[in-house]
Image: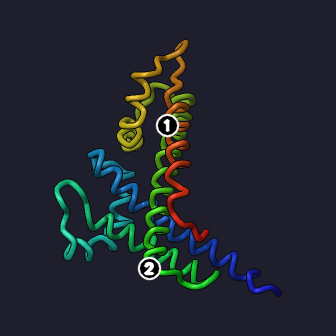
Amino acid sequence: MPNHYFINPLIFTIDILFSCYILAVMLRLFLQWVRTDFHNPVAQFLITVTQPALRPLRRYIPPVGNIDTACIALLLILALVKLAIIASLTFGIPSLFTLFMASIGDLIGIGFKILEMAIIFRAVLSWIMPNSYNPALIPLYHLTDPILRPVQNLIPLISGIDLSPIAALIGLEILSMFIDPLFPHFI
């Protein structure tokens, strides 16, 4: 059997496991930035999942103003470890600078995907459950409002249909296309 027969599923598993935890930490960071209510069930889940890794880091890395530097450090550590493992399984570990830049690119890509999925989720919910209130959705609105509100000011409702999510998604994707090539990729 070829060597990649076992390596590809292993790389996929490593990527998924690390990316899911990075997603949880990044969502926690985003929700802190938009100052969502952390008594919410979604926010409580994120705190429960991420607190074991953040607690030891917070002893050594204090926040700078409103910026949770321990959260940012954890994101960078997770991305570095993920990409170092994947690179060592495929072609060997690259230079630390290349690994660092690839990690930042990976985190930026995950951040864009979080925002895009949140906008899509919000748009779908507005179509299937208009004018409904669910406290679990409040973080979703807090996360997407800073992106959608300026677009909604530029694009009015057309026959009661809000096209701002489509415009915001196009804008995020174009921005991602400009930023993504600036960073090396291992996956």
Secondary structure beneath label 2: helix
Q: Nearer the viewer, residue 113 or 51?
A: 113
Disc 2 residue crowd, few under 14, some 14–19, many 20+, Cα 10 Å: few
Q: Quadrant of residue 63?
A: bottom left
Tell me what residue is drawn at x 50 percent, y 64 percent.
20
What percent of the width, then of the height, locates residue 122?
49, 37
Q: Nearer the viewer, residue 134 or 178?
A: 178
Tell me what residue is drawn at x 38 percent, y 29 percent.
150
In this rendering, the answer to whether 82 lies above or below 132 is: below
In this rendering, the answer to whether 142 lies above or below 16 is: above
Disc 1 residue crowd, few under 14, some 14–19, many 20+, Cα 10 Å: some
* Quarter placement of the C terminus: bottom right
The amino acid at mark 1 is Arg
Q: Quadrant of residue 174?
A: top right
Q: Is residue 138 left or right of residue 99?
A: left
Q: Nearer the viewer, residue 160 or 88?
A: 88
Q: CA distance from mark 1 to mark 2?
A: 39 Å
Q: Are marks 1 and 2 in contact (CB under 8 Å)?
A: no
Q: Which residue is mark 1?
A: 122
In this rendering, the answer to whether 178 lies above or below 105 is: above
* Quarter placement of the N terminus: bottom right
**Mark on residue 96?**
2
Mark before the other along the chain sequence, 1 or 2: 2
